Amino acid sequence: MSRIDYEQRIPNNVGLSDDRRLQRALEKWQPAFLDWWTDMGPEGFQARDVYLRTAVSAEPGGWAVFDYVKMPDYRWGIFLADQQEDRRIHFGDHIGEPVWQEVPGEYRNILRRIIVTQADTEPASVEQQRYLAATAPSLYDMRNLFQVNVEEGRHLWAMVYLLHKHFGRDGRDEAEELLARRAGDADKPRMLDAFNQECKDWMTFFCFTMFTDRDGKYQLASLAESGFDPLSRTCKFMLTEEAHHLAVGETGMQRIIERAAELAMEDPNGDARAQGGIDIPTIQKWVNYWFSYSIDLFGSEVSSNAADFFGAGIKGRYREDQYEEHTALDQFIHLPVVRDGRVVTEEVPLRNAMNEVLRSEYITDAERVVKRWNKALDKMGSPFRMSLPDRKFHRRQGIYAGAYFTPNGDPISEDQWEARRKDWLPTDEDREYVRSLMKPVYEPGKMANWIKAPSRGLNRQPLDFEYVRV
Ligand code: BYC
Ligand code: FE
Ligand code: FE
């Protein structure tokens, strides 16, 4: 049982006060983090009371408390899931060996790279979302935005702890760099593409939490399998917080979709835009865009990095225990690949296809959510249906990048692509239209016209609760 020590400047359940050097190093990083939060965190409302949850224990039951907090006073801390006794590496080349509590020298570089990549996404997302509060569709939504933001800040802390504790001088340098890169910056961009994309409207925020945070869920889950025990324990606890981010995305999108269907039914011409809402075809374009950028985050379908990570016992599959065999040697999967403009099936060693294996788990999960949206549409008597584009559509990374596919996955020429892309992806006009709807609604319980009210409030509070004291 590991209570979190709130007496210290940095709340933690890792016995930070027993390691003075580490504590001093992190206390030096802390003001730099707060400066970054002030510069790049949510714009406005920093002096306001926000009804936020804060982690207070790593226990599965009551791990969090809800209360009003001003964001700069949020207790960002370092929390690891409890250590399991006699835990063993359970996949790759080291099966059966005790898990590592220290970084194995031979894997130092790849571990550092994975941790830095994971870390980089967390502040990036906060930077991307920083202007959204000014156009929040309700106080309920504004509060959810801030909750996601402070927790992504805490995820950065989680990774910076690992860097400081286990990677010495290099780790401290990396921790500084994490506060120096900027989402979308031409000179110092964030590491992965999705985290350099603009997030200037709320439908993008909900797509991001639906699709991009979901990559986070799958990456964290595969790192929770890690033979490097501190990484595994850190990721396990991060996943507890992540569930809410995904719920914000899933339900946010569903509320936009249901509202679109409702407005279309009210309009004599079935046109949701004429009723001041967002129409389903526009929503579908946002889904196409963010789904394709988010599945890019799994890396290339065929990857020697992925094979190395798995072989080393550092990054497993999603719920590795669901598989019967854990070396993944002498096994193959079949992948559609592009050869001379044609799609043909090729056999790939399983270890090299680990990115694709994880991506497939992700897609199955995302499809489950889309089914739920469609069930809601069906129940309303709406003829509309949502879908996910094929995994080859609009890819920037991996073996399909550079070729052109329809949302159904049919190969097309570049000319055909250029002629049709306006039907599949957001155009400047679409973005302008969606942005024109983004007007703040700050009255408790009220919602912007383009989004349905949630079915209930948060933490058993009523919908008209003052989630943010504006
Ligand atoms: N954009 O073999 P490849 C989250 C690079 S999200 C740009 O294909 P690999 C969150 C790759 O780095 C979860 N570059 O890929 C969500 C490599 O570069 P180098 C974040 C990309 O290494 C919302 C090259 O292409 N966590 O937590 O097998 C809010 C070829 O590499 C991209 C992690 O990602 C891209 N999309 O796999 C807040 C987990 N994709 O080395 C937070 C840690 C690939 O040639 N990261 N590249 O310079 C990893 O496990 C791996 O680095 C990746 C890539 C899965 C990302
Ligand atoms: Fe995160
Ligand atoms: Fe998240």
Image (cartoon, rainbow, N blue to C red):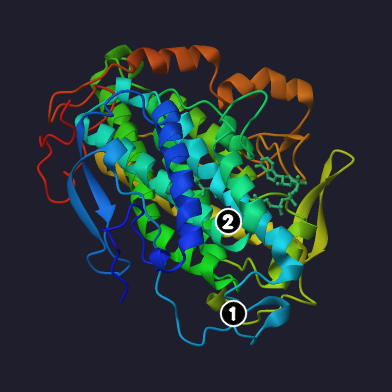
Where, by quadrant of the figure, is residue 410 drawn?
top right
Q: Which mark is residue 163?
A: 2
Marks 2 and 1: in contact by CB < 8 Å?
no
Q: On screen, 232 above or below 372?
A: below
- Residue 207 % position (x, y): 44, 36
Quick one: which residue is furthest to the right in this view? 340
In the displayed structure, does residue 72 sit left or right of residue 228?
left
User: What label does residue 297 carry, if any?
Assistant: none
Q: Secondary structure at mark 1?
A: loop
Task: Residue at 71%, 59% (x, y): give it.
Answer: 110
Residue 420 pos. (x, y %): 65, 22
Q: What crowding class fits label 2: few (fewer than 14 Cα within 10 Å), some (14-19), or many (20 or more)?
A: many
Left or right of 21: which side holds 141?
A: left
Q: Is residue 251 left or right of residue 344?
A: left
x 70%, y 81%: residue: 94
Q: Residue shown at 54%/78% (left/top)?
A: 321
Q: Amino acid at mark 1?
A: Val
232 relative to 143 in the view: left or right: right
The quadrant holding residue 133 is top left
Q: Nearer the viewer, residue 14 or 64?
A: 14
Identify which residue is drawn at 77% across, 45% down: 399
Q: CA gap, disc 1 to disc 2?
A: 18 Å
Where residue 370 sits in the image (x, y, percent)?
43, 46
- Whichever of callouts 1 and 2 sits on the residue coming sooner in the sequence is 1
- Numbered disc in front, either 1 or 2: 2
Disc 1 marks which residue?
Answer: 99
Q: Foreground residue, 431 or 242?
A: 242
Give the amino acid at mark 2: Leu
In the picture shown, does residue 16 fall above or below 391?
Answer: below
Q: Position of residue 288 (x, y in %)?
A: 54, 34
The image quadrant where one finds the N terminus is bottom left
Q: Is residue 213 visible?
A: no
